């Protein structure tokens, strides 16, 4: 490893401290076996509250007012970014406690084990290293010309997924699931990758050629692919907050969840995210029991 890269990697604790001092965030996902689960990860963006010699404390993952309580011993993959540098590492949940932030506010925190090491990502493999990786979920996107027209399509989506999870209908093939939904009043389709989920919305990454489609429309209608854990992509409406191009010409967009046109869909989406996390945690517990 070149000396400059070695220096950056060996100073990762200092980097974590910098993020905490700046009220910055980490990204985390419940670890899965990507050979058995080739679908996308739900990657949560959480504020880094505290770092000590033995542990890292972050906010609990959250979305649209719902806090997700991860179980002790759940294995996680984490990423941290400073400028153009990114590191990945594996860790696990060791508990929870309330910590006092620099502003004096008591905040519920999730305690993570301090990793033995972290690995710096290359530009080509910005979300993975040999020992840890994020598998970015595929997202189908449409410019939403009339947000009220999404209500019927989202209602059908909710009924379809609910029936599958309850065993009323069989899970579709990936090809069937991809074309299963009637569309609202939308423009031409394009694609994105799901970068992260936060309390108020999600981050998406687009090809630069789609910048015009993103910037010209206030709303997107999207289908997020969480197969095979959730058999049918979940549909939802998003409102654009900001976009920017990075130095590698990747287009990043921040979007808020938009449920004002279909309030009943909010609980379904949050419940589905919860179901996804619980299913992955259950698979981890089963694997630990078999290994014991």
Image (cartoon, rainbow, N blue to C red):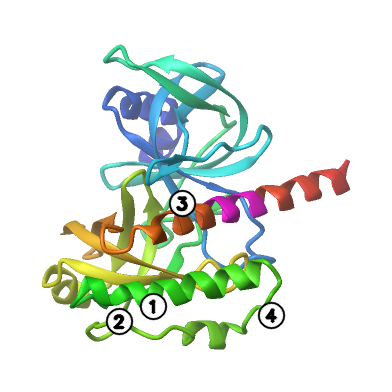
For disc 4, the marked residue is 170
Marks 2,1: beta carbons within 8 A: yes
For disc 2, the marked residue is 184
Which comes sooner in the sequence, label 3 or label 4?
3
Give the main secondary structure, helix, strand or loop, of the magenta stretch. Answer: helix
Residue sitting at 28 percent across and 62 percent down? 238
Which comes sooner in the sequence, label 1 or label 4?
1
Left or right of 257, for residue 210: left
Point out the image quarter for the C terminus. Answer: top right
For disc 1, the marked residue is 153
Q: Which residues are magenta?
A: 274-280
Which comes sooner in the sequence, label 3 or label 2?
3
Q: Residues within 10 Å of mark 4 (few under 14, many from 20)?
A: few
Closer to the observer: label 1 or label 4? 1
Residue sitting at 32 percent across and 52 percent down? 201
Report if residue 139 is visible in the image.
no
User: What x and y, as percent, mark residue 280?
Assistant: 65, 53
Cα–Cα gap, marks 3 and 4: 28 Å
**Mark number, residue 43:** 3
């Amino acid at each position: 490893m070149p000396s400059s890269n070695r220096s950056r990697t060996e100073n990762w604790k200092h980097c974590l401290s910098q993020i905490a001092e700046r009220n910055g965030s980490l990204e985390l996902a419940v670890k899965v076996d990507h050979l058995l689960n080739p679908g996308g990860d739900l990657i949560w963006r959480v504020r880094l509250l505290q770092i000590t010699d033995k542990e890292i404390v972050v906010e609990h993952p959250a979305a649209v007012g719902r806090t997700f309580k991860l179980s002790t011993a759940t294995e996680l993959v984490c990423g941290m970014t400073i400028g153009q540098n990114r590191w990945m590492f594996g860790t696990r949940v060791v508990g929870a406690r309330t910590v006092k932030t620099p502003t004096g506010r008591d905040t519920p925190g999730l305690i993570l084990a301090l990793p033995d090491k972290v690995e710096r990502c290359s530009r080509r493999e910005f979300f993975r290293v040999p020992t840890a990786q994020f598998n970015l979920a595929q997202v189908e996107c449409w410019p939403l010309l009339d947000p009220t027209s999404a209500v019927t399509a989202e209602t059908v989506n909710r009924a379809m997924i609910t029936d599958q999870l309850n065993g009323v209908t069989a899970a579709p093939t990936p090809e069937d699931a991809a074309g299963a939904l009637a569309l609202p009043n939308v423009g031409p389709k394009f694609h994105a990758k799901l970068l992260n989920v936060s309390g108020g919305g999600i981050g998406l990454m687009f090809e630069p050629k789609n910048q015009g489609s993103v910037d010209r429309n206030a709303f997107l209608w999207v289908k997020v692919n969480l197969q095979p854990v959730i058999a049918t992509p979940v549909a939802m409406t998003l409102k654009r907050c900001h976009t920017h191009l990075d130095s590698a010409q990747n287009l990043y967009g921040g979007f808020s969840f938009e449920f004002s046109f279909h309030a009943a869909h909010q609980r379904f989406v949050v419940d589905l995210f919860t179901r996804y996390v619980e299913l992955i945690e259950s698979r981890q517990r089963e694997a630990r029991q078999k290994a014991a």
